[in-house]
Image (cartoon, grey):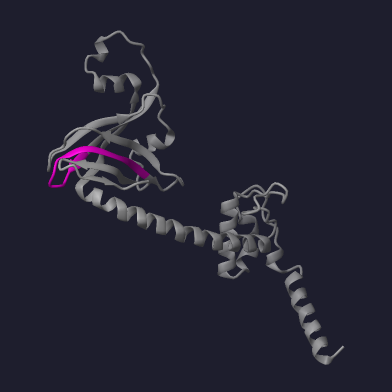
């Protein structure tokens, strides 16, 4: 064996020993079944800042679960048992997520470009939101409902008062679009109201109406929106189709 090869071998052994020695924080076992890392804070503190963040993000993403390779998603295996494994898996996930985020940003930009001309003409927004009983909702659309024979129900539903305004120079004859609310505490947005109007709204004029689904009980997310949870929801207007008095039609597609 040449002197160069011998030195290379000794260097490799030294590096491996340094990495595998008992005091190496990378070998620290992750807490099982919890996102609480307080029991391994000393070992976390010995990691570089970027690696510590990777471990923390992995544990948060995995919710403390450890899957066996047999049952893990091959595209995103949550199988890490040590800091080193968590760092490697989180790096892989972050790289793929970066690509996915870039693609999503491109799709959103394309969507916004198609929606912008419709938003310039028509605006839809929530005037009020309330959780009420089905009987109360029925009475909103039929003032005489309370005097009629009907089955009393304690079931609750989510009801919005929606306002649509025409900012264009022509009357609107038909309109379709969705009101949504981005939820800080959830991945998917909250569907507020699907608007499908077949009525004339003159230039500069507006209309208001109630929007709700009698067949659906109010969810916890809808209750939070109605209670005006501070900073949690951001309303979005996504017009899809517009027909003007001139016969012009604008379609943002899907």
- Residue at (31%, 48%) from the top-left corner? 252
Task: Find residue 51 and report its horizontal and vertical position in percent.
Answer: 59, 67
Task: Find residue 148 and report its horizontal and vertical position in percent.
Answer: 27, 9
The residue furthest front is 247
Q: Is residue 22 above or below residue 229?
A: below
Q: Is residue 46 above or below residue 221?
A: below
| Left/right of residue 206 with respect to residue 134 in the rendered view | left
| Left/right of residue 70 with respect to residue 62 in the rendered view | right
User: Can residue 171 be found in the magenta stretch?
Assistant: yes
**Magenta extent:** 164-181
- Residue at (25%, 48%) from the top-left corner? 118
Q: Nearer the viewer, residue 194 or 143?
A: 194
The residue furthest bottom is 3
User: Can residue 82 be found in the magenta stretch?
Assistant: no
Q: In this figure, what is the number of numbered marks? A: 0
* Predominant SS of the magenta segment: strand
The residue furthest top is 149
| Left/right of residue 247 with respect to residue 228 in the rendered view | left
Q: Is residue 42 visible?
A: no
Q: Is residue 111 visible?
A: yes
Q: Nearer the viewer, residue 13 or 42?
A: 13
Task: Find residue 57 and report its horizontal and vertical position in percent.
Answer: 56, 58
Task: Choose top left, top right, bottom left or bottom right for residue 75.
Answer: bottom right
The residue furthest right is 1
| Image quadrant containing the N terminus | bottom right
Task: Find residue 147 and report its horizontal and vertical position in percent.
Answer: 24, 10
- Residue at (40%, 29%) from the top-left corner? 218
């Amino acid at each position: 064996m040449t002197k160069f090869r011998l030195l290379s071998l000794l260097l490799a052994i030294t590096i491996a020993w340094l990495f595998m020695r008992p005091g190496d924080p990378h070998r620290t076992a992750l807490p099982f079944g919890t996102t609480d890392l307080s029991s391994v804070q000393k070992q976390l503190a010995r990691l570089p800042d970027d690696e510590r963040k990777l471990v923390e993000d992995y544990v948060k993403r995995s919710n403390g679960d450890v899957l066996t390779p047999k049952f893990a998603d091959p595209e995103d295996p949550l199988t890490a048992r040590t800091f080193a494994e968590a760092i490697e898996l989180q790096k892989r996930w972050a790289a793929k997520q970066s690509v996915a985020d870039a693609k999503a940003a491109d799709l959103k930009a394309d969507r916004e470009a198609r929606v912008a001309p419709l938003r310039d003409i028509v605006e839809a927004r929530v005037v009020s939101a309330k959780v009420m009983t089905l009987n109360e909702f029925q009475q909103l659309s039929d003032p005489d409902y309370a005097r009629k024979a009907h089955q009393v129900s304690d079931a609750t539903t989510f009801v919005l008062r929606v306002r649509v305004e025409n900012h264009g120079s022509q009357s609107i004859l038909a309109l379709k679009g969705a009101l949504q609310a981005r939820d800080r505490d959830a991945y998917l947005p909250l569907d507020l109201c699907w608007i499908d109007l077949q009525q004339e709204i003159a230039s500069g004029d507006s209309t208001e109406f109630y929007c709700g689904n009698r067949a659906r009980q109010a969810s916890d997310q809808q209750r939070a929106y109605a209670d005006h949870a501070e900073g949690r929801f951001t309303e979005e207007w996504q017009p899809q189709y517009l027909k003007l008095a001139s016969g012009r039609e604008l379609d943002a597609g899907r």
